[in-house]
Amino acid sequence: MTNERNIPLFNLQKQFDSLKPELESACLKALGSMKWLLGPETKEFEKEFAEIMGAKHCISCSSGASAIQIALMAAGIGKGDEVITTPFTFVATTTSITLTGADIVFADIEPETYNIDPKKIEEKITSKTKAILPVHLYGYPANMDGIMEVAKKHNLIVIEDCAQSHLSKYKGKTTGTIGLAGSFSFYPSKNLGACGDAGAIITDDDSLADKCSRIRHSGRSNKPYEYDYEGSTLRADEIQTAMLRVKLRHLKTWTEMRNNAAQMYNKYLKDISQIKTPKNCEDGSTQSFYVYTIFAEKRDELSKFLTENKIGNSIYYPKALYDQPIYKYMGLSSKDFPETDLACKSVLALPMYPEISEEEIKIIADVIKSFYG
Ligand SMILES: Cc1ncc(COP(=O)(O)O)c(C=O)c1O
């Protein structure tokens, strides 16, 4: 093992180097257009993203967090309503709920997929429940048949948080197209990342799409200085959508490359009994591998060992949301969420980016083997 070796968790540099001339010229074109908000690049990006996702509409916005908030607001969720979601997600999933005025209700996850468990959702339904907000964590599609069945039975809206699942498929359907709407993040490290913040909502519902596009634009109606809805300044800017258009052309290939990398990890890690590799998708479902996450014995020690050996790694997520200081008021305990609690103590994300090589994956596997002896 050489000291110069350094395998990062994400590698944005490789992608940037390969696209530099295209990104620079797209950036200059967007700048020169003088249409820096909701201009031609944004309109084209929205068309192209909707098409690749198999949705009727795409409404770009300022971030993945605002995408969730806008979709919930457009669906009429607000004060007095409850939204059921997973406690094993990035905090933006839940802050986007409370920013609408609604309350968060947590339901535990399924063990191997780390996604919300439809059976646990049903236990949490009250007369105030209005929506379910599943997250396709790590790109692994949530159990949408189970979720949609509960939603249908109780007349609930489903908004899918697809911040980590660009182009993942659930039984042949792209995630984000199964519920009423799907929200996406284009945070730089995401499978489709802007050169800054951006996000989008996709939906087949004409009226929801119209409402989303107004809410992100200060709630404007078609008449100047008249407002139909309360909204805010939540647009994506033209330079970011121009960057995203360049990158979108590569998303399918990058997704395949991530998938190949995951298969290589599966191959090289399969004999290590102290870890579990990600569950395989079945029935026409596919995972787009935003991160490659293992379930590991002695997780914290392994993480430290990888870091000492200059191998990037991270824990998504070390602390469940009900344990976060902001949600202490809910008075929840890890005893009520045994699967989330176990996942927080055991998961570890290994380096994942389209360009990661077989050689790098083999090195990572060898370091993990040497850790367990
Ligand atoms: C599951 C999940 N939801 C929401 C978000 C929020 O996205 P953004 O950072 O673009 O606001 C993220 C991004 O990190 C995420 O991973």
Image: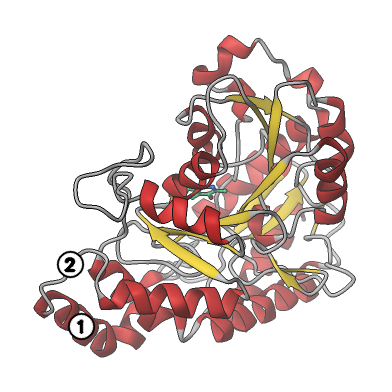
Residue 303 placement (x, y as % from top left):
60, 47
Asked which secondary structure carries label 1, the reply is: helix
Residue placed at 44% from the left, 62% from the top?
A: 59
* Residue nearest the viewer, comparing 314 with 117: 117
Packing grade of label 1 (10 A; few <14, some 14-19, many >=20) is few
Residue placed at 51% from the left, 52% from the top?
A: 307
Does residue 161 appear left or right of residue 68 in this picture?
right
Query: What residue did someone put label 2 on?
Result: 36
The verdict on label 1 being within 8 Å of ligand 1 is: no
Residue placed at 17% from the left, 83% from the top?
A: 29
**So how many labels did they put on this image?**
2
Residue 141 placement (x, y as % from top left):
74, 59
Query: What residue did someone put label 1 on?
Result: 24
* Residue nearest the viewer, comparing 186 with 17: 186
Picture quadrant of residue 235: bottom left
**Gap between marks 1 and 2 measured at Cα:** 16 Å
- Going from N to C along the chain, the mark reached first, 1 or 2, is 1
Q: Quadrant of the C terminus?
A: bottom right
Picture quadrant of residue 21: bottom left
Asked which secondary structure carries label 2, the reply is: loop
Residue 27 placement (x, y as % from top left):
20, 78
Tell which residue pokes out farthest to the front in this image. 223
Residue 145 to residue 84: above or below: below
Residue placed at 52% from the left, 80% from the top?
A: 251
Packing grade of label 2 (10 A; few <14, some 14-19, many >=20) is some
